[in-house]
Image: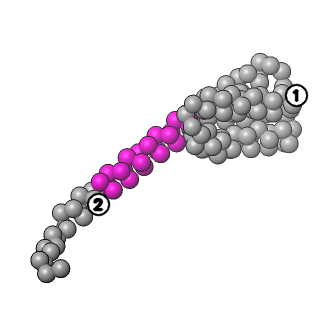
Amino acid sequence: MIAWELSHDIGFGKEKLLKAAVAGIPRVAQAIAETPPEQRPKALEAAERSYRQTVQELGYEEGPVQSWVSAVMLRLQTEVKAQESTKQKMLEALQEELLQAATEVDSNVIPIERSEEQ
């Protein structure tokens, strides 16, 4: 959909590049989600510059470029948040599982009595 808005009047090669950029959003989002939180704004800015440069190099004017980049960035930010949420849920589930396992181990421990013959 995003690629179509810019590509309905262009050649196949340009359309293919735009579709590839959109298809790569999940991978870019994963890389950004894995960066430390304090570095994410810079990573998002770098991604935005890259998307903008790509579309400008295809020969589009600023109006359509801005619209497309804004749509792509909204989708990217949404994907980053979704991946962060998924990661947080997985960490919470793992922590709960470890806590439960530790509790089970503690309840199954049989005290060993030491003999006085040492």
Residue topped by disc 2 = 101
- At 57% from the left edge and 31% from the top edge, which residue is drawn? 38
Q: Where is residue 71 in the image (x, y as percent from the top left)?
A: 65, 28
Q: Give the range drawn in magenta.
A: 77-99
Q: Where is residue 90 in the image (x, y as percent from the top left)?
A: 42, 49
Question: Closest to the observer: 116 or 58?
Answer: 116
Q: How would you classify the magenta stretch by its main secondary structure? A: helix
Q: Please identify the quadrant where the C terminus is shown.
A: bottom left
Amino acid type assigned to the residue bearing label 2 in the image: Ala
Q: Position of residue 32 (x, y in %)?
A: 61, 39
Q: Does the image show residue 22? A: yes
Residue that lies at the very extreme toward the bottom in this rendered image:
117
- Element on which disc 2 rests: helix
Label number found at residue 38 = none
Q: In this view, does 100 lie above or below 49?
A: below
- At 75% from the left edge and 28% from the top edge, which residue is drawn? 49
Q: How far apart are marks 2 and 1 (CA)?
A: 59 Å
- At 76% from the left edge and 22% from the top edge, which residue is drawn? 64
Disc nearer the start of the sequence (2/1): 1
Label number found at residue 59 = 1
Question: Closest to the observer: 57 or 107?
Answer: 107
Q: How crowded is mark 1: few (under 14 residues within 10 Å), some or many (20 or more)?
A: few
Quarter occupied by residue 17? top right
